[in-house]
Amino acid sequence: MLFNSITFIFVFLPAILLLYYCTPSKYKNYTLLLASLLFYAWGGFSYAIILIASILINYLFVKQIEKDRPSKKTWLIVSLAFNVIIIVIFKYLDFILSNLNLLGSALNAGFSEIPLKHIVLPLGISFYTFQQMSLLWDVYRGENTEKTSLTNIALYISLFPQLIAGPIVRYNDIVEQIKERVSTFPLFRSGVQRFVLGLFKKVILANTCGELADLIFATPFESIGTSTAWLGIVAYSFQIYFDFSGYSDMAIGLGRMFGFRILENFNFPYIAKSIQEFWRRWHISLSTWFRDYVYIPLGGNRKGPYKTYFNLILVFFLTGLWHGATWSFIVWGLFHGLFLIIERLGFSTILKRLPAVIQWIYMILVVMIGWVLFRVEAFSDAISFIGKLFSMGSASNDSFMLYLNNERIIVLVLAALSSSLILFKLKKFVEAKKFSQTIFSQSLYDLGVVLLFLISLVYINSGSYSPFIYFRF
């Protein structure tokens, strides 16, 4: 069930909210847990069985680690291995088998091709498995000092706002809210506002930019010009940002409607002035997960420069692999890891001496070239597209205006403004002046939210099925 569907907005969500707020306080978590399992089962009953089995098995692992005996490290290793194996089976098995077949064919050693298994990937398995792995780590390290309960863990993992595409929530960040939280009208109101903002981002900005990007990337690359290539990657850069940040906004908003305060996952990443800063602003929950559970345990930057570079490359290899079982994602991850190393080698010092606009141009160029690697599955095709971006000779007869109409131009302008430093500074100014606390400004803001909601509904009714990009991961 999609957050941007009529069924969710007008049937599922109102019904669950009504049931939740009519339930006595001590049973609210059970109501929300059942609602979350129903939400997940909507996409396939077998998915829900896998999720429930994963929760139960990891709960047993947690209880063994909590006993704080010499064998708890063994239980940690076994539990982490179990979760990795689960992801490998569902997400990477065919990728491994296909590469083994290619290797066997290349060696020409009478290798018999291994048939692929074509296992269906359960929705959100990467997200909820990573959450369970972080829980196991935190319990092992003693960061969660109170004993866990099955209900708390089950709700933490399956909470429907963030179940399918994050953010990747830490147990320690939300356990107190699971045990006791206060639902207030201002919090609920801010949740509705945030949900509508995310809905607008998804159905208007992301989907419109996505249609444009799909048109251009579906065109044979040899027949497009430089301007069209740039239009395509700009549109895709907006699509993936507003699609994923829109989902995160909706998840945060839904959480507030039920009394939860889910941490932010995006912070205007396209205003960054380096790749290091970009990753502090983009998919914050994933980058901090890899930092805290992979990079730092490996030694971080404490064991000399070469070990630091190795750790960075490994982390971004895994970051790319996390996004999908293709070499294009791995190359994308390594591409970002390479620029992080370049910045650590001293380029960041040089970069800071340059004008801010030059720093920004460097960052956005690296990020958009990276998005080509992310978007185009075949590496040779990605290189061909990147070549088009910098092939000025093909610009003379470029017909990029054929891909644009008034609606797309308006959306591209809105997307540029909404992801820019202008909106970021305006947001900070409004927060500092506390304009949002006045009755007039609140009424004006609510009116704007209603308008965005109505426009979004028009797009939903006139549009086609459009799942979130990160549902694949």
Image (tube, rainbow, N blue to C red):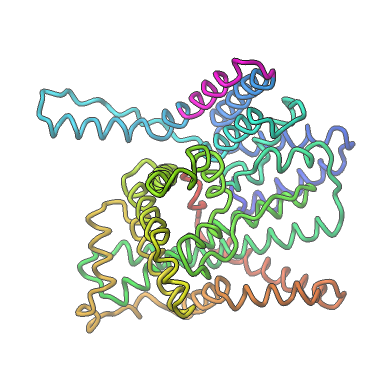
Q: Position of residue 137 (x, y in %)?
A: 60, 32
Q: Quadrant of residue 222?
A: bottom left
* Residue 72 vertical placement versus 423 (above, below): above
- Residue at 53% x, 67% y: name it: 205
* Residue 269 vertical placement versus 291 (above, below): below
In terms of depth relative to the viewer, which is nearer, 424 or 344?
344
* Residue 71 vertical placement versus 394 (above, below): above
Residue furthest bottom in the image: 396
Residue furthest right in the image: 24
Give the side of residue 24 with respect to residue 268, left or right. Answer: right
In terms of depth relative to the viewer, which is nearer, 168 or 254?
168
Give the side of residue 254 with respect to residue 26, left or right. Answer: left
- Residue at 46% x, 67% y: name it: 209
Q: Classify the position of the N terminus by image quarter.
A: top right
Q: Position of residue 108 (x, y in %)?
A: 10, 29
Give the side of residue 10 with respect to residue 363, left or right. Answer: right
Q: Is residue 83 magenta?
A: yes
Q: Position of residue 389 (x, y in %)?
A: 29, 71
Q: Position of residue 399 (x, y in %)?
A: 29, 80
- Residue at 20% x, 35% y: name it: 102
**Main SS of the magenta segment?**
helix
Q: Quadrant of residue 130?
A: top right
* Residue 399 vertical placement versus 147 (above, below): below
Q: Is residue 22 magenta?
A: no
In terms of depth relative to the viewer, which is nearer, 199 or 175?
175
Please count the marks in the image.
Answer: 0
Which stretch did the figure color magenta? 67-84
- Residue at 49% x, 45% y: name it: 302
